Amino acid sequence: MVPEFDAKLSEYARLLVEVGLNVQPGQTPSIESNVEYAALTRKCVSACFDCGARNVAPYFGDDFTTREAFLRADGAVFDEYPSYMKARVDWLLEQKSPRLSFTGSNPELLKGVDPARIQARRKASNQPTKPYFDAMMANRFQWCVGAHPTLAWAEKVFPDKKGEEAMDALWDAIFSVCRITGDGKAVERWKEHVAATAKRCKALNEYQFTSLRYANSLGTDLTVRLPDNHVWAGGSEFTPEGVEFVANIPTEEIFTAPRWDGVDGRVYSALPLAMDGNVIRDFWMDFKDGRIVDLHAQAGEEFLRRAIEVDEGARCLGEAALVPYDSPIRNTGLLFYNTLFDENASCHLAFGHAYPSCVKGGEEMSEEEQKAAGLNQSMTHVDFMVGTPDLSIVGTTRDGKEIPVFVNGNFAF
Ligand code: ZN
Ligand code: ZN
């Protein structure tokens, strides 16, 4: 390994373990890994022990084996979920093990596999793992998603580069957007970043704006009403024991949910939208009483139309997220074809499902109660970027005061 790369990889491992998971003395973190990620995983294992971990429980998958099994194993295998795997997630849940995982696997790994097998596997694993993943979504233990390049992903992001060269370029991009420079100070930089994000969330939560108005020179003029008692969140989260962690590295956004029936006007996309391998470019959408009533795209319009027709809620907004235009991800100028990165590139909206936590007490509400509180319900959730260098967002308070939230694409406070 090149010494400079090795130093950056160590810094990345420390960042994921110390800031992402924030491993506490006596905990046994799990690392959901892949044989190709061995170098980074080993550094993460060491970083966990440096934090005082009791033990570390990595699990190494292998893309070749996964694909080979999907193609060649006995068909009945996919209807079963092995009891030893169920025992593993039950054990991790019982321990409240912090969970580190990586995004980046080959998006075309299962190309040509019988979709019935994939469907069966998903169905068989759903029930046995549900208590574990429900607990994770409710932040009952620390969890963090980082990234690891794979060749297929790297060559997609850098179509002009091949092999090692593409991998190196993607590593460089990941390091730079994670604020890793090789000076060993990424952990400190992230602590500052998380604290600054928390301060902005607090200010927005105190304002309790009734609506936000988006405008820019592309032609966006959109009014987004916010639910009563909405909550802005971003940066870090907390377990019930009060352990702070960062679920996504990198993360730049502060987000809440619009009222599903409270969006009016037109919004223009600021970046291409990559969805299931298709790219939708230069589109606008018109809203009336929360619903998309018209849309147009220069390219990929049929994919966008299909996406908003998935169910009733797919044509309403479920997320409004603020990201400064001058953000490390947008500054790379890259389309990563990966939500972890692309949704942190600029201000975005999402059509489809709203996070229950975006309204006070939302996690304890039934789906009907969430909808009544203003939170959109859908089986889909698609982020699209709307932030431009000249975007302005003005918030209106309950007593009608107008407060600048974004000026020229960046936070006004
Ligand atoms: Zn978001
Ligand atoms: Zn989203």
Image: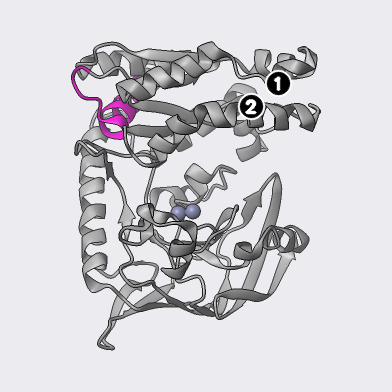
Name the residue type under label 2.
Answer: Ala
Q: Secondary structure at mark 2?
A: helix
Name the residue type under label 1.
Answer: Phe
Find the magenta span and give its range.
7-26
Q: Nearer the viewer, residue 170 or 352?
A: 352
Rendered image quadrant of residue 301: bottom right
Which residue is tagged 2?
Answer: 124
Task: Name the colouring of the figure.
Answer: one colour
Q: Is residue 300 left or right of residue 386?
A: right
Q: Nearer the viewer, residue 340 or 67?
A: 67
Q: Nearer the viewer, residue 346 or 262?
A: 262
Rendered image quadrant of residue 218: bottom right
Quadrant of the image for the N terminus? top left
Which residue is tagged 1?
Answer: 78
Q: Is residue 369 left or right of residue 12?
A: right
Question: What is the magenta segment's predominant secondary structure?
Answer: helix
Magenta includes 17?
Answer: yes
Q: Secondary structure at mark 1?
A: helix
Q: Residue at x 21, y 24 (%)?
A: 24
Q: Is residue 239 left or right of residue 392?
A: left
